[in-house]
Each structure stands twice: as structure tokens, then as C-alpha cells.
Image (cartoon, rainbow, N blue to C red):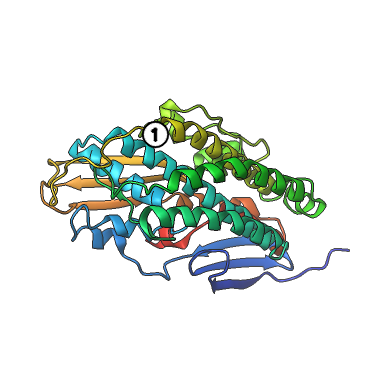
Amino acid sequence: MAIKTEPFILNIGPQHPSTHGVFRLRATLDGEVVVDVEPVIGYLHRGIEKLAEGRTYTQNIPFTDRLDYLASITNNLAYVLAVEKLAEVKVPERAEYLRVITAEMMRIASHLMAVGFFLNDLGAMMTPVLYMWREREKLLDLFEMVCGQRLTYNYMRIGGVSHDIPEEFLPALKRFVAEMPGFIDEYDQLLAGNEILLVRSKGVGVLPEELAINSAASGPVLRASGVKWDIRRADPYSIYDRFDFDIPVGSAGDCYDRYWVRVQEMRQSVRILEQAIPQLPEGEVCAEVPRLLRPPVGEVYGHIEAPKGELGFYLVSDNSIAPYRFRIRPPTLINLTALKDMVIGWKVADLIITFGSIDVCLGEIDR
């Protein structure tokens, strides 16, 4: 016999763990069953979009590091690509290769944390995330060689990159690229057939293909729902059209598929690195760009396939040294809008792992 209960509201948060920023979820429950959810954001009070309108185009690059700070270099890349499109700046070949190499390293580092924290939310305390932290530390060592930083890199520049790679970088990167497929195999052996992972994530938090498209979802969240859409192929930027790689696509759109797509994308990033390293040409790493750049009057939207999805920058120029308008299209803010449809009717424990499978970063949501 069903027990009649009264719905009640449970505030989950505001909290930081596994959300990379302060987040609150206002959940309406009937017992353990989720009836409604409302994500409550805005605790960071960043104001980056307005701050950027009072600074020069180059001074704004460090702001982009603070958006998704687990994928800082790709944030840099999306912004400078938009400025270069606005100002018609041509980037040297060597810089293009360095951009792709560092962006794909960043994708692997971001996905390692996405998968590790997802498994942590699921209840696999520490072991998987520490395995993945191990490889991320190697990537952070490589980033430190390049620019001296391990989190907010400020490496991209309008017209190229801030400086060339040191002599010891490529040998160390080649070692990592040679070792990484074996480590991904190790993750698969540890996790892919794990009974708890399968029971807790298969068929849970389903985002159907049509709803994913209508929600404007992107990145692994969209591809897990069966939509083969990747901006590196759909609207190629930089030199991505020179590389051979696959676009992993799920079928069920559930938590497991979102986990699986990220693991497979790490394999594809390794493939891109294997091709890019031997092709790296000699030459300049940055074009000559005025210190106080004044793009012609106009507007532009530049976007990339960031680790979490479509990251775009909309810029308006009035021919001054600062953007007249500066707006960001952050992937996890858009992906988060589908959460309600993914969790209604499921239990509280399922809500937690479904939210974890989206891989959010509040830095780019609150901006």
C-alpha cells in the first residue's frame, strides 16, 4: 500500500565539493522521489563580462582563465580566436600547432577530473579520482614547463601564444602521449564493467536526443544523447581540419554514456597529439599586434569545442581599445538547464550523480 506523504523542500547547498564553485539546488521531494528542482546560482559575484568592457583586449585574457579554471587554456583560446576574427589577425603556423597541442592536453586534464569527481559522487571514494589525478599532475607539470602556471595559464595571446615551449617540453610530452593509452585502459579495466557503476548509472538521468538539441546542450552531454556534433568538425577553427580523429557518441543519453564519452574523448585527444607533435613547424609563435589593439567597428561571435561543450564569446567593437560589449556563452550554464527534465521521478541519490555527470564549473556559470 502506497503511503501518502506531503512534498517538502530540501536545500542541497550552497556548497562547493564537486561543483567547482558555490552551488545550491532547491529540490522538492516526495519522500525520496524528486518532484521538482531549481538550480540557484549567483554566489560568486564575478561580474567578468562588465569588468572586461573597461579593460583592453589583451588585459581581458586573464579573466578567461577564471571561467572554467579546470580548462583555462581553452578559455583563453576561445576568447583570442574571437578577437582575431574581429581584428583580422593572422596567426603563425607554429603558434597554431602549440594552441592545438595545449588545448588537447587541457581536454584530457579536464575530462580526468570530470570522470574522477563523477565517480566520487557515485560513492567510489578516492581510488578512481586519485588514479586520474595522477595523470593530471603529469599534465600540470607540462603546463608549468610552458608558462610557469598550474591552473590559470594566461598562455594565449592575440596573434599566437605568449612564448615558445622550452627544450625539455616535447620529450616529456611524447612520454606522456606514449603512456596515456595504457592508463586509459587501466581505467576501463577498473571501471567499465564495475557492477556498482553500471547499476547506478545505466538508464539513470536520461537526456533524450530531441530534448538535448532543444535545450541547446553541447559537448559530452549532447554527444552522449546520440548527437554527433563537435565544433572542431562542424565549424573547424585553428588547424583542427588537418587532424584525423573520431567523435565518440553515446546512444542512451544516460549518466553512463556521459562517463563513457569523456573516456573515449581522452583517447581521441591522444590521437590528435600523436599527429600534431611530429608536424610542429619552426617559426614565430606570435604575430605583431599593437599593444593597444583597436579592432574596426563591428561585432563577432567566436566559439570552440571546449571540454565541457560550446564556449563562445560575443564581442562588439566601437574602434576603441576595450570591447564595447563582452558576452560569454558558457557550456555548463546551458547544459544545466536540462537537469530538471533529467531527474524528476528519480531518487535523491540519482539526482546527485546526474548532476555530477553534467560536469559543471560555477566559475563560468556565474561569470
Where is mark 1, residue-wise? Answer: 280
Across and down, in percent, residue 234 comes to 44, 29
User: Could you say which quadrant of the image residue 143 lies in?
Assistant: bottom left
Residue 256 in the image: above or below residue 153: above
At horizontal 78% and vertical 68% (from top left) the residue drawn is: 4
Quadrant that contains the C terminus: bottom left
Q: Nearer the viewer, residue 197 or 36?
A: 197
Residue 254 in the image: above or below residue 143: above
At horizontal 59% and vertical 53% (from top left) the residue drawn is: 135
Quick check: 218 left or right of 302? right
At horizontal 35% and vertical 32% (from top left) the residue drawn is: 281
Across and down, in percent, residue 339 comes to 57, 54
Across and down, in percent, residue 174 comes to 52, 41
In this rendering, the count of numbered labels is 1
Q: What amino acid type is highlighted by mark number 1?
A: Leu
Across and down, in percent, residue 61 comes to 28, 55
